[in-house]
Amino acid sequence: MSTVLVVEDDRDIRDVLRRYLERAQHAVLTTGGGAEALRLLDVGQVDLVLLDLGLPDIDGTDVLLAARAAQPPVPVIVLSARSALADRITGLTLGADDYVTKPFSPAEVVLRVGAVLARVAGAAGPEQIPTYGRGRLRIDAAAHQAWLDGVALDLTATEGGVLATLAGTPGRVFSRLELVNRVRGYEFSGYERSVDSHVKNLRHKLNPDGATVVTTVIGVGYRLGWSRDD
């Protein structure tokens, strides 16, 4: 189990990220200030930092530099409302492993956390990517990619999120509201029935197997119809 330190002064965002990260089996530490973040880094039991640069007490870049100076260096994913290209370049130049602009999908952030941790640990080879339906469907959630019969699927972020969520627990039925919350998170205030249109597009891209890969449970929601391979 990896330990993720969330450094974010907005309590609502901290709480949402904690829930999503814990659901993905990560241990989570949270703080709203940079000084406490530096103390937790000094303790030395943090595997990755999710860092808001706009902190109330010290500059977030100080936390970023401290994480990179640790032995071994602690990877950092910046969470920032600063979306200008110059800000992204600055963050990456200072040593951030990834840069996510607000508002963001917490589900996507969790996938990015997994991707960075895998990269740091020595990313698993393609043979370790989960497969379904006797090898026909491969889903690399961390890399936001999926293949059907060896052909890459051109999925939107939401379509890929729906597929990855269903594939996380094959056979389990997810309600529309649950899919909205898992894929789009706190930033999304749209009607949950919008999931139906994303599922329709996803099935079209999975043709001719779309209806068997993503099955409908009438009155409840959707599930992955193919089993995960051993």
Image (cartoon, rainbow, N blue to C red):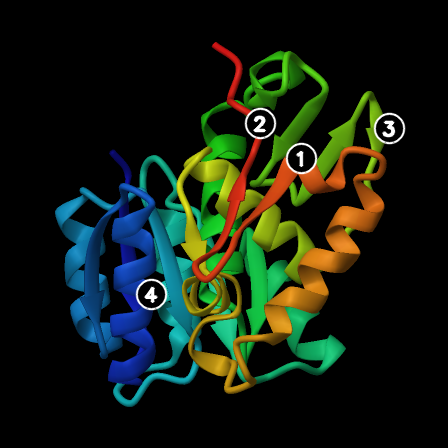
Callout 2: few (<14), some (14-19), or many (20+) C-alpha neighbours within 10 Å?
some
Which residue is labeled 4 in the image?
A: 17
| Distance from Cα at disc 2 to Cα at disc 3 | 18 Å
- When asked about the image quadrant of residue 33, the answer is bottom left
Question: Which comes sooner in the sequence, label 2 or label 4?
Answer: 4
Which residue is labeled 2 in the image?
A: 226
Going 57% across and 56% down the picture, which residue do you hit? Answer: 98
Question: Which comes sooner in the sequence, label 2 or label 1?
Answer: 1
Label 4 secondary element: helix
Callout 3: few (<14), some (14-19), or many (20+) C-alpha neighbours within 10 Å?
few
**Marks 1 and 3 close (CB-CB < 8 Å):** no
Going 72% across and 78% down the picture, which residue do you hit? Answer: 86
Residue lying farthest front?
218
Label 3 secondary element: strand
How far from the left and from the top, in percent, is residue 180?
A: 50, 68
Quadrant location of the N terminus?
A: top left
Residue type, numbered disc 2: Trp
